[in-house]
Amino acid sequence: MNEFDIIANYFAPLSQSCNGAMGLKDDAALLRINDSYELVATKDALVENVHFFKHDTPANIASKLIRVNLSDLAAMGAKPLGYLLALVMPRNTDEAWLKAFSDSLANECHIFGGALLGGDTVTHDGPLTLTLTALGAVKRDQAFRRAGAKEGELIYVSGTIGDSFLGLNILKKELKNISPEAEKFLTRRYHIPQPRITLGRKLKGIATACTDISDGLAADLGHICECSGVGADITIESVPLSNAARNILSSHPELHPQLLSGGDDYELIFTAGEDKKDDIARIATTLGLPLTAIGRITAGSKVRVLDATGKEVHLSKKGYTHT
Ligand code: ADP
Ligand code: MG
């Protein structure tokens, strides 16, 4: 059973009495708090040796923890309000670690907004385990869903794809002889995701469906398709890549399809009608962030990745799952 089957079989039935839980199929849940706003709630866990390396700095671990959750708020178009932190730490955790970790959390709250609201602190003999609940707000009925994409609409992604996957492979020493500048850029993209909070809020009235890319571009586009009851055709050449990623592909072309299934991008993938092209171009210019059309929603039910000649490219693995 993979993680999605577990959620669907054992946990989704428990969400049925709340429409805003969206069957545990979206990035976050929506709870009506008054006539004007909805509360947006999401939670992610990071576990040592699964999501980060034992020797990673406390500052990077704090940044990643808060930013992966903020990415889910961004995918809903929400504004961050606050966080609940559960810290389950090895007994020998020292004060220098706690100081660096909390300083980094404070800095992230300062950058993105929202305060620490509560949590729990536990010591044990196991690995460092962190979970964070992020709460945000969105104007009533304005949150994005994974459902909503329609046949013929364009599919866009923010930023560049695959950097984090390459950064992780460099850290695992599976990719070698990379220039120091490319190594620095790509490993930073792995350690410090850039949650697209401002973009999410600017896409109101423009995007018809949206999610963040945490499991891999193809898998997360698959989630939009499944929830919207549509298919998608994208072209591999149109997927935006950084210069560092392009340089690596020039000597490792076999890695190209894997960039679409690697995961940890924390960019937004969204759909919009053709008539929104100019609005999207304007937002890209305002934010200094590329927003690239990579394909179209189809009447089918599958995500197809096509090459320049229209032939289907098969991805060995559509995305990352943990079980
Ligand atoms: P994301 O990558 O956006 O964080 P996930 O793929 O981790 O989302 O999870 C998919 C959905 O399943 C989300 O709505 C999440 O809240 C829900 N979910 C995952 N695990 C559990 C669980 N143990 N109990 C309840 N809901 C869960
Ligand atoms: Mg998500």
Image: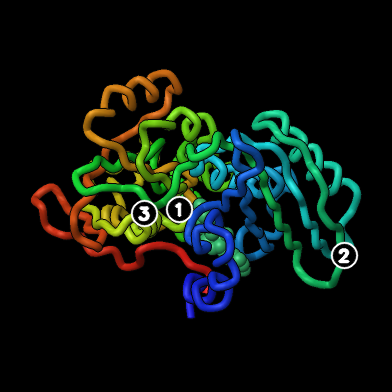
**Residue picked out by circle 1:** 165
Q: Amino acid at mark 3?
A: Ile
Kind of residue at disc 1: Phe
Disc 1 and disc 2 in contact, CB within 8 angstroms = no
Mark toward the start of the polypeptide (2 vs 3): 2
Ligand 1 within 8 A of label 2's CB? Answer: no
Name the secondary structure under disc 3: helix
Disc number placed over residue 123 in the picture, else none: 2
Q: Earlier in the sequence, mark 3 or mark 1?
A: 1
Is residue 70 something one can see in this rendering?
yes
Residue 58: which disc?
none
Mark 3 crowd level (few <14, some 14–19, many ≥20, 10 Å Cα): many
Q: Residues within 10 Å of mark 2 (few under 14, many from 20)?
A: some
Q: Residue at the left extreme?
A: 309
User: For this view, does 290 lie left or right of residue 128?
Assistant: left
Which residue is tagged 3?
Answer: 224
Depth check: give the residue in front, 198 or 22.
Answer: 22
Q: Is disc 3 in contact with disc 1, using a CB cutoff of under 8 Å?
A: no
Residue at 45% x, 64% y: name it.
320
Instruction: Please state which amino acid type lies under the numbered disc 2.
Output: Thr
Horizontal arrangement in the rendering, residue 10 relative to residue 199 (left or right):
right
Q: Nearer the viewer, residue 233 or 261?
A: 233
Alpha carbon separation for disc pair 2 and 3: 39 Å
**Which x, y percent locates residue 299?**
18, 56
Indicate the position of residue 165 as horizontal and vertical percent values.
45, 53
Q: How many marks?
A: 3
